[in-house]
Image (spheres, rainbow, N blue to C red):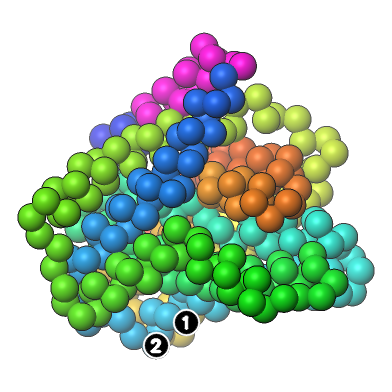
Amino acid sequence: MIIPFIKILFFFAAGLLFVRLNRENEQIYNFLNKYLYYFGLPAIIVYKLSSLKLSSFSFCLAAANIAPIAITALALFILFKTKILLANTAATLIIVSTLGNTVYLGFPASAAFFSENAIGYAAMISSMHNLVIFTFCLLLVKIITQDNLSFPLFINHTLKNPVLLSSLAGLCLAGFSINISGLPYEILSDISKTVIPLSLITLGWSIYGKYSFKRFLKPVLGACAVKLLILPFICALTIHLCQEITMEFKVSLLEHTMPAAVMALTVTRELALDEELASKTIAASTAAYFILLPLYSRIFEILF
């Protein structure tokens, strides 16, 4: 496990180094984000899911991955309705508290904790998360931010999401046992090889210089607590109730421990939410994740 995590830290540190050498070059960071969000991330999701057998899918697996996200989003929505949170803050927190770094960091972490074979399960679980986040959670965000919700516009915006579309495509390929072969398979394979190192570099780049949390201290701490502690706890509780210890459940819990996704910044920008709160949460939760790694490792030893 040590060597894979050293590789993760190497690429993460490379991102910190690159941004230090190119502090003013925001265009490179935006390009990397767009490449991963619109191209690299969908490619690796389809590539990994297409060769996965869905025979392991069950009600308990769905519950372990849907319940934590749905409960969290509903709780934040209630805080908005009771006027404890402002609209923009509540909507932003729904995104950053539920959208975990299940690909950028989750795929390499799955390989580090378990094996390369676990990445396929990570892709399936990440797809389930995406389906809930970009439908149910996004609907709550739209209700919060729009006085008159237009369902046609909501559906149109949802169906244009590359992560959701690739998740649906990959699940369909796996469900109907359609294997990708030949040139398309080779292209997806080559693109997928770029995703993990570039995602970790982008992750390191994203947190550079975002160390002042004075104005956002309470919402950032709250989002980090939800993302890194409460979501994993709900997932672990569901797994315990189901009495499941198979690989897909192990990966489910691991994916729920992921910090806020770099992709959350792109999503908040597209939805005209609080980008600065999103970026601070990404930075803080990522730093906290590496601090909490020994705790997570110990929990895995106890549970599994």
The foreground one among 75 and 126 is: 126
Answer with left or right where residue 107 lies relative to residue 290. left
Q: Which residue is mark 2?
A: 59
Asked if the residues shown at circle 1 and circle 2 are in contact, with their CB atoms under 8 angstroms apart, the answer is yes
The reply to whether residue 234 is visible in this rendering is no
The image position of residue 100, as x and y in percent, is: 52, 56
**Distance from label 1 to label 2 (Cα)?**
6 Å
Answer with left or right where residue 283 lies relative to residue 37. right
- The image quadrant where one finds the N terminus is top left
The foreground one among 96 and 297 is: 96
Q: Residue furthest right?
A: 83
Check the image and report above or below for 157 versus 57: above
The image position of residue 267, as x and y in percent, is: 60, 52
The foreground one among 236 and 284 is: 284
Q: Which residue is mark 1?
A: 63
Does dot 1 land on a helix, a strand or a loop?
A: helix
> Going 59% across and 47% down the picture, which residue do you hit?
266
Disc 1 marks which amino acid?
Ala
The foreground one among 271 and 78 is: 271
Check the image and report above or below for 86 versus 174: above
- The image quadrant where one finds the C terminus is bottom left
The reply to whether residue 214 is visible in this rendering is yes
Picture quadrant of residue 125? bottom left
The image position of residue 252, as x and y in percent, is: 40, 67
The image position of residue 219, as x and y in percent, is: 78, 51
Picture quadrant of residue 140? bottom right
Which residues are drawn in magenta? Answer: 9-24
> Going 69% across and 29% down the picture, which residue do you hit?
211
